[in-house]
Image: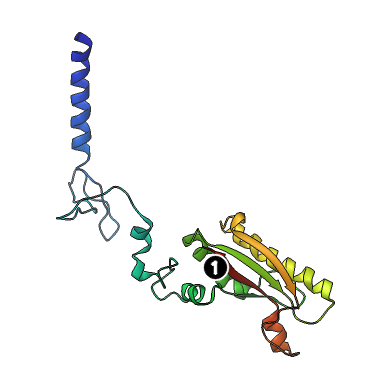
């Protein structure tokens, strides 16, 4: 009994300190200056006047409601997100193109590859197949190997940006599935590519 009476003041003191500390919030004004010491300011979090406040934060709270999603299937990078629209309508992400006989990602394609990575980060349930392609020049075996290197190069880049390996599979079609028919430099440049196909969500 005596022991419990000694603990009671400690519990009360702890409660009073916890209740009092929650009301003083140091903030910065818009000019970036700290508020005066000891000043009491309002919290940035405002409880609604009606309804229940929940401590649970959902993906919808962060990403917006279903109306902000294209077709309600995927989270968007922005309200008018072209990449999400492409994913919903065609089942593809941005295509990455390569220089002749190369499998390193071009600087001009890094932005689209980064957008693919961000989109995959928002849509963590999506799995993709990265399809490597080559133009018609060269032997079939060589082009299959080159397409594989292109797909693996892109996969490695996405892994470095945080996309999990188990969400991506790689396949090479070499020259077998051209995006554009023809034997011109313009056609060849459109066929040297890595495509991102959504296979599960």
Query: In x, y percent, where is residue 92?
Result: 56, 73
Residue 162's image quarter?
A: bottom right
In the picture, which quadrant includes the N terminus? top left
> Residue 22's x, y, as percent?
22, 40
Q: Is residue 106 left or right of residue 82?
A: right
Q: Nearer the viewer, residue 95 or 166?
A: 166
Image color mode: rainbow
Whether 55 is drawn above or below 14: the answer is below
Q: Eyeballing the image, is 96 above or below 59?
A: below
Badge 1: few (under 14), some or many (20 or more) residues near its Cα, within 10 Å?
A: many
Please name the residue shown 59% across and 64% down the image: 128
Helix, strand or loop at mark 1: helix
**x then y, percent, for residue 177:** 71, 79
Relative vertical location of residue 56 with respect to residue 153 in this rendering, above or below: above
- Judged left or right of residue 112, residue 153 is right
Name the residue at 26% across, 61% down. 30
Left or right side of 135 for 65:
left
Out of 189 and 131, give the one closest to the viewer: 131
Snapshot quadrant of residue 2 = top left
Residue 103 visible, this angle: no
Whole-percent x, y for residue 17 in the image: 21, 32
Question: Mark 1 = which residue?
Answer: 116
Q: Is residue 136 visible?
A: yes
| Looking at the image, residue 166 lies above or below residue 24 | below
Identity of the residue drawn at 15% across and 55% down: 50
């Amino acid at each position: 009994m005596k022991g419990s009476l000694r603990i009671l003041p400690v519990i009360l003191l702890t409660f009073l300190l916890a209740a009092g500390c929650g009301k003083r919030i140091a903030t910065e004004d818009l000019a970036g200056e700290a508020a005066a010491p000891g000043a009491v300011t309002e919290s940035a979090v405002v409880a609604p006047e009606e309804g229940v406040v929940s401590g649970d934060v959902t993906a919808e709270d962060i990403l917006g409601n279903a109306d902000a999603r294209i077709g309600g299937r995927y989270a968007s990078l922005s309200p008018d997100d072209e990449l999400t629209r492409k994913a919903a309508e065609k089942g593809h992400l941005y295509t990455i193109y390569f220089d002749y006989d190369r499998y390193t990602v071009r600087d001009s394609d890094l932005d689209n590859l980064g957008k693919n990575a961000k989109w995959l980060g928002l849509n963590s349930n999506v799995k993709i197949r990265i399809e490597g392609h080559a133009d018609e020049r060269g032997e079939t075996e060589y082009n299959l190997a080159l397409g594989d290197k292109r797909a693996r190069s892109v996969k490695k880049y996405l892994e470095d940006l945080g996309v999990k390996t188990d969400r991506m599979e790689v396949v090479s079609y070499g020259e077998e599935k051209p995006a554009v028919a023809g034997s011109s430099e313009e056609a060849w440049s459109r066929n040297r590519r890595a495509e991102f196909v959504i296979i599960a969500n």
